[in-house]
Amino acid sequence: MSFAADILAGKSAIVTGGATGIGAFIVRKLGSLGAQVGIVSRKEENLQRAVVAFKADDGIEVNYRVGDVRDPELISRAIASLAEQQGGMDYLICNAAGNFICPTEQLSANGWKTVIDIDLNGTFHCCQAALPFLKQAKAGGRIVSISTTGANFGWPGAVHAGAAKAGIQNLMQSLSSEWGKYGVRANWISPGPIKGTEGVDRLIIQQGLAERSLERIALGTFGEGDDIANAVIFLCADTGKYISGAELVVDGGSQWHRR
Ligand code: HXC
């Protein structure tokens, strides 16, 4: 799928967790279609490496700030500073996430809290910090959160992430309702397994679950980072102007209810 090369010219986007994984695919796509992009994540070395790679591979200048989505004050400063540098903010992509496989019986209270804090609380902090800027977006601000199909059917072995992502989905629905009056759209994408990401390597392939996962995918293959990035563009560009409070499932027709 391809979009007109200048479809996002003049737009400003911020992607949390944009240095790696699915986030980096989203950054490359936003930038190559003309948007100014800022990324924020915890590790400066990841941010620096990513910015160099975006420039070398795609010719995109990407701005960055160090920030942990769990810390409301820090992340708010990082988002505001990026938005000011980029002359505002049209799109907020809430992509930062943490996850690990652990049977629920063995999951510590802090293990549970850590993932809820990153995924759910972090998304809340970022949305609140972004709102003053999104309100000013000329064509209506967009929030796109990256969820997972695991939030819809339960996620055995990753109950913290499944519950947090289900919370994010409800948060997007509530924000779409509350912030529609500001022209802000809030939606989420639920990816299935995306190949070449650290998450799928660690959570599926290294767990010996690749074959079983593939059997459940109607199209018979894991997705690609660009499949998610294209869905983000569809929701952010004019194509998504009448969509809010909605889920866009991008999973090759997975049937997660098949145990
Ligand atoms: C059991 C674990 C654990 C594990 C951490 N903990 N890893 N428990 N099994 N494998 C527990 C720790 O013991 C501790 O609890 C608590 O969780 C916090 O751990 P820290 O290491 O101190 O946390 P932190 O350094 O903040 O790291 C956060 C993290 C980490 C989420 C735990 O894994 C991380 O930063 N990951 C990188 C980001 C990431 O996961 N990306 C992939 C997302 S992919 P105690 O009780 O000991 O104090 C995704 C979608 C995948 O979400 C889709 C697949 C289909």
Image: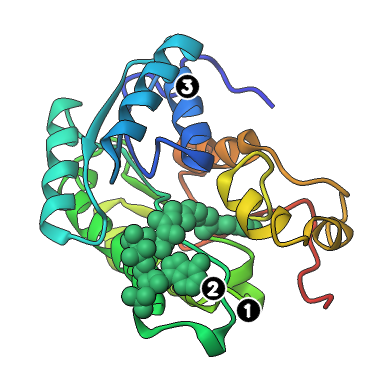
Q: Nearer the viewer, residue 223 or 181?
A: 223
Reading the image, the residue beneath label 3 is 7
Question: Which residue is at the front of the view, 207 or 259?
Answer: 207
Residue 49 located left or right of residue 196: left
Q: Viewed as shown, does residue 195 lie left or right of 257?
A: left
Sequence-wise, which precedes: disc 1 or disc 2?
A: 1
Q: Is residue 92 left or right of residue 31?
A: left
Q: Is residue 250 above or below residue 257?
A: above
> Nearer the viewer's eye, disc 1 or disc 3?
1
Quadrant of res 148: bottom right
Real-space CA distance between mark 1 and mark 2, rounded to the nearest whole angstrom:
6 Å
Find residue 257 and report its horizontal and vertical position in percent. Answer: 78, 76
Q: Residues within 10 Å of mark 2 (few under 14, many from 20)?
A: many
In the image, what residue type sits under mark 1? Answer: Gly
Residue 184, position in %: x, y? Answer: 32, 52
* Residue drawn at 46 percent across, 38 percent down: 20
Q: Quadrant of residue 37?
A: top left
Q: What label sits on residue 162 in the rendered view? A: 2
Q: Residue at x 40, y 38 (%)?
A: 18
Q: Earlier in the sequence, mark 3 or mark 2?
A: 3
Circles 1 and 2, Cβ within 8 Å, touching? The answer is: yes
- Front label number (3 vs 2): 2
Judged from the image, the secondary structure of the residue bearing numbered disc 1 is: loop
Image point 21% across, 46% down: which residue?
Answer: 67
| Disc 3: CA contacts within 10 A as few (<14), some (14-19) or many (>=20) | some
